[in-house]
Image: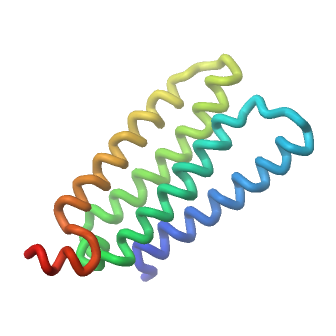
Amino acid sequence: MKSISTWFFATATVFALCGMIWGIQMSASHDYTFAPAHGHLNLIGFVAMSIFGTYYALTPEAAMSKVAMVHYWLVTITILMLIPGIFLAISEQKETLAIIGSILAVISMALFLFMVLRFGVGDQAKAEK
């Protein structure tokens, strides 16, 4: 089974590729209407997931916890709900998906804070115990 950090990095890379393709499409069409959704895809989908992957690579004790896998799926589901939700909200359709995705994003970050406070970071984690 792949490590949790590998899953975070692989998924982050898929989201980055989607964001790049979307950015090229927006640029080619000169239509930046959905730039906020594109920005969130890159920021949470690539940047945040890469940071999470780095944390779990540096902190094996945290990576081995069951909460790490919950964190991975929560962030992934967040992106899969938030980005279409922002798209729909900008299209003046229902905002429900964007609201749910936003709440999940906050919960995901709170869970990351819990992990950092619980396990520390890297070698610091062992030194603090």
* Residue 106 image-quadrant placement: top left
76 to 65, vertically: above or below: above
Q: Spot the residue most to the left.
A: 129
Of all residues shown, which one is farthest toward the top?
A: 92
Q: Residue at x 45, y 34 (%)?
A: 102
In the displayed structure, 87 sits above or below 40; it is above
Where does the C terminus fall, quadrant-wise?
A: bottom left
Q: Position of residue 85 (x, y in %)?
A: 58, 32
Q: How many marks?
A: 0
The image quadrant of residue 89 is top right
- Residue 50: horizontal and vertical position, in percent? 50, 64
Q: Is residue 1 left or right of residue 43?
A: left
User: At which x and y percent is residue 115?
Assistant: 25, 60
Q: Identify the residue at image location x=29%, y=46%.
A: 110
Residue 19 location, x and y as percent? 70, 52
- Residue at the image position 31 percent from the left and 55 percent from the top: 112
Rendered view: 83 above or below 118: above
Would you identify the image quadrant in which residue 16 lies?
A: bottom right
